[in-house]
């Protein structure tokens, strides 16, 4: 065919080899086709397909780029090219390709998902969030993206928005204890402590031994000023794990906050020996937390912070008859 009368010859011949499961011969035919007819996108994309299957990505990328240049209407070409660029660790190159897929098919959820992932890899959290929001808007059953969105918004300290998407998830996955716990943390961070407690109670109904959720619930009671209840709750975590450092830290914070309140509620706001005894109780709890490597650093910081408020040797000598705090606000401790 010296005058190029049969431009589809390589298409038909390549198709025969494909149906005969002879990929090497099909690849050879498509190579011949794109050399004889370099303006036919079909030969470029077909060759690109076989090269990609052999992990010869660099040449496959060139083939798909040529196919798109000749015929930029096929979504599959952009998808293949976008995937190859991601495999080659080129998210910057892949992003406009997947954006083109979304332009051609606005409801393409795979493209929307991948765009969000690319933004995340690039460190563009805002771009990722917007992309995931569009995904959820188009597919309100996509609980995986809802959780990723809720978690990312939480890390961005956008707690109200985080709660919104975690709620959407929990409407469909009512037993997702991990999402519930994250939502409880979000309520806690915006000082909606009663909502947080209610959420942690649901977590514990599903996972009674979740000691972290128990401690967070105790911390919420502490913030509400319900110190006896807070201590009672945190003690549950220690019954599960007597070496759990975070439980000792929370219990120390309960004692510390009790002392702070007792001092601040008096006309003369000065630290008395009774207050120092309670601060020492907090100090002792932080000291116990040192046994847990995960919380040891936090425990040391709290010990350093509170040490000036605990009784000195002179204080103890001058108050030898006082072993327990005597003020009314401390009666629940005895």
Image (tube, rainbow, N blue to C red):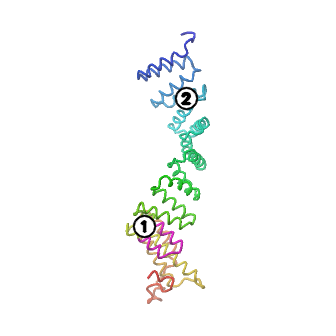
- Image-quadrant location for residue 237: bottom left
Left/right placement of residue 177 relative to residue 153 reads left
Q: Nearer the viewer, residue 286 or 76?
A: 76
In the rendered image, residue 228 lying in the magenta stretch gets the answer yes
- Residue pictured at 58% horizontal, 39% vertical: 107
The answer for how far apart the CA atoms under marks 2 and 1 are is 56 Å
Q: Is residue 288 above or below residue 85?
A: below
Placement of the C terminus among the 4 image quadrants: bottom left
Residue at disc 2, secondary structure: helix
- Image-quadrant location for residue 100: top right
Comes first in the chain, label 2 or label 1: 2
Left/right placement of residue 221 relative to residue 269 reads left
Residue 59, how many percent across, how many down? 51, 28
Residue on which disc 2 sits: 64
- Residue pictured at 57% horizontal, 24% vertical: 41
In the rendered image, residue 44 lying in the magenta stretch gets the answer no
Residue 245, how many percent across, how many down? 42, 67
**Dominant SS in magenta:** helix
Q: Nearer the viewer, residue 133 or 265?
A: 133
Q: What numbered label is drawn on residue 245?
A: 1
Residue 258, how many percent across, how many down? 51, 77
Q: Categorize mark 2 by other alpha carbons within 10 Å: few (<14), some (14-19), many (20+).
A: many
Q: Nearer the viewer, residue 126 or 21?
A: 21
Q: Is residue 266 above or below residue 147?
A: below
Task: Point out the stretch of residues depicted in magenta.
Answer: 214-235
């Amino acid at each position: 065919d010296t005058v190029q009368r049969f431009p589809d010859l390589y298409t038909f011949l390549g198709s025969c080899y494909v149906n005969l499961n002879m990929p090497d011969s099909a690849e050879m035919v498509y190579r011949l086709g794109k050399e004889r007819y370099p303006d036919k996108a079909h030969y470029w994309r077909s060759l690109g397909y076989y090269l990609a299957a052999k992990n010869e990505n660099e040449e496959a990328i060139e083939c798909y780029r040529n196919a798109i240049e000749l015929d930029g209407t096929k979504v599959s070409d952009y998808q293949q090219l976008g995937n190859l660029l991601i495999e080659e660790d080129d998210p910057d190159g892949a992003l406009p390709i997947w954006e083109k897929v979304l332009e051609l098919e606005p409801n393409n959820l795979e493209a929307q998902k991948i765009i969000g992932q690319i933004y995340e890899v690039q460190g563009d959290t805002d771009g990722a969030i917007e992309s995931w929001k569009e995904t959820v808007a188009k597919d309100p059953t996509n609980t995986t993206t809802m959780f990723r969105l809720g978690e990312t918004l939480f890390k961005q300290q956008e707690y109200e928005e985080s709660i919104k998407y975690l709620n959407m998830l929990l409407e469909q996955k009512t037993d997702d204890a991990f999402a519930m716990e994250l939502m409880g943390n979000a309520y806690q961070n915006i000082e909606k402590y009663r909502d947080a407690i209610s959420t942690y109670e649901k977590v514990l109904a599903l996972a009674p031994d979740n000691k972290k959720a128990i401690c967070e619930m105790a911390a919420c009671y502490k913030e509400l000023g319900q110190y006896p209840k807070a201590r009672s709750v945190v003690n549950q975590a220690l019954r599960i794990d007597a070496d759990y450092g975070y439980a000792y830290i929370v219990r120390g914070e309960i004692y510390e906050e009790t002392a702070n309140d007792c001092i601040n509620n008096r006309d003369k706001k000065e630290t008395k020996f009774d207050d120092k005894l309670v601060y020492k109780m907090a100090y002792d709890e932080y000291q116990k937390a040192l046994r847990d490597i995960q919380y040891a650093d936090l425990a040391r910081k709290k010990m350093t912070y509170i040490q000036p408020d605990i009784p000195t040797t002179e204080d103890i000598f001058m108050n030898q008859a006082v072993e327990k705090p005597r003020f009314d606000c401390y009666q629940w401790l005895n």
